[in-house]
Image: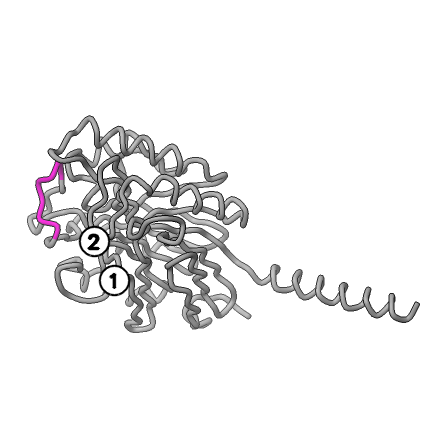
Amino acid sequence: MKKNISILLVLFSAYMLAECQESKTILTFGMVTDAHYADIPDSGPKAYSQSLEKLKECVDTMNYYQVDFLIELGDFKDMSQPPSEEKALIFLYRIEKVFREFKGPVYHVLGNHDMDCITKEQFQSVTVNTGIPSGQSYYSFDVKGIHCIVLDANYDSLGKDFSKGQFDWGDPNFSEKELSWLKKDLRKAKGPTLVFCHQLMDGEGSYYVNNASKARKLMENSGKVVAVFQGHYHEGQYRMINDIHYYTLKALVDGGGKQGNSYAKVTLEPGTLKVQGFRNAESIHFGISNKKTGISR
C-alpha cells in the first residue's frame, strides 16, 4: 500500500511540474525557411523536389505541438530552367497547399527567389497570411500579447520592387517607406516584439540587407525587440547585437531524405526564448531582459 502511495505521489509531482512548466509558456510558434520547392533535378546539396515531403514533416510536427502559428522565412519556391512563370506558380500552389495543412495561423516572409520569375503580387495571390489583407509585403500582428513584425527586404537601392527576376540578389534593401512604417509600428507596439526577415540584418556583406543598420537602430531605440529570425544564409548562424538576438535558421532544401531537413519550434517564457531545432536546425536558448520586455518571472 505504501509503495502504491509513493508511486502516486511521484506521478502527481511529475504532473504538477509539467503543469507548472506549461503555465510559464507565453507563446510557441513554428518556423521554416528556404524550402526552394521546384519539380526540377537536384543541384549540389539542394534537393528541390523533396521540399514538399520535408515541409509536410514540419507541418505535422507543429500540428502535434499545437503551436500558436507557423511562419516561413522566404524562398518558399524556386523555378525551372529556362524560367517559366506558369511552372513557378504551379510550384508555389503545391507547396502552399502543404503549408496550409497547419491547423492554425500561417505567415509568409518574402524571399528573393519568390520573385525569380513572378511578381510580389502574383506570389501573394496564391499564398495567405492569416488576418493580413492581400498585397501587404511587410506587416505586423499580435499573438498572446507578443507583437510580431514581418519585413520585406526585396527592394533595390532605388526602392524598386524585386520582380520577375529583375533584381540583384546581393542588393537587398528596405524601402524608405517601409522604414518609416517600421518606426511607427514599433512605437505603437504594446508588448515584447519579434521580427522576421528573409535576408540577414545582423551585419554587412552579400547575404545582408544593405541598409539593415537603419532598421537595427529603430529596433534598438524602441527597447521592445527581443529577437530577429532570418533565413537566406543556408548554413545558419547566431549573433547578438545590443541586446537583440539574431537567429538564422538553416535551409530546409539542403540535403536529401528525412535527415536532410531543417525547421524549429520557438517557445517564449519569462526570461527565456528557446529555439528547439529539428533535424539539422540548431537549438539554442536566449536569455531575455525582463526590464526590456516587460515580462515578469
Residue 165 inside the magenta-drawn segment: yes
Residue 293 visible at all: yes
Q: Quadrant of residue 57?
A: top left
Counting from the top left corner in percent of width and height, residue 99 is at: 39, 38
Residue drawn at point x = 29 percent, y = 62 percent: 236
Q: Quadrant of residue 130?
A: top left
Residue furthest out toward the right: 1
The disc label shown at residue 218, or none: 1
Task: Name which residue lies at 40% across and 36% down.
Answer: 98
Q: Identify the residue under disc 2.
A: 179
Residue extending farthest top? 86
Label ID, residue 239: none
Kindly state the secondary structure of the residue where label 1 is placed: helix
Residue at screen point 10% across, 43% down: 160
Which image quadrant is residue 200 in? bottom left
Magenta portion: prevailing SS class: loop
Which residue type carries mark 2?
Answer: Leu
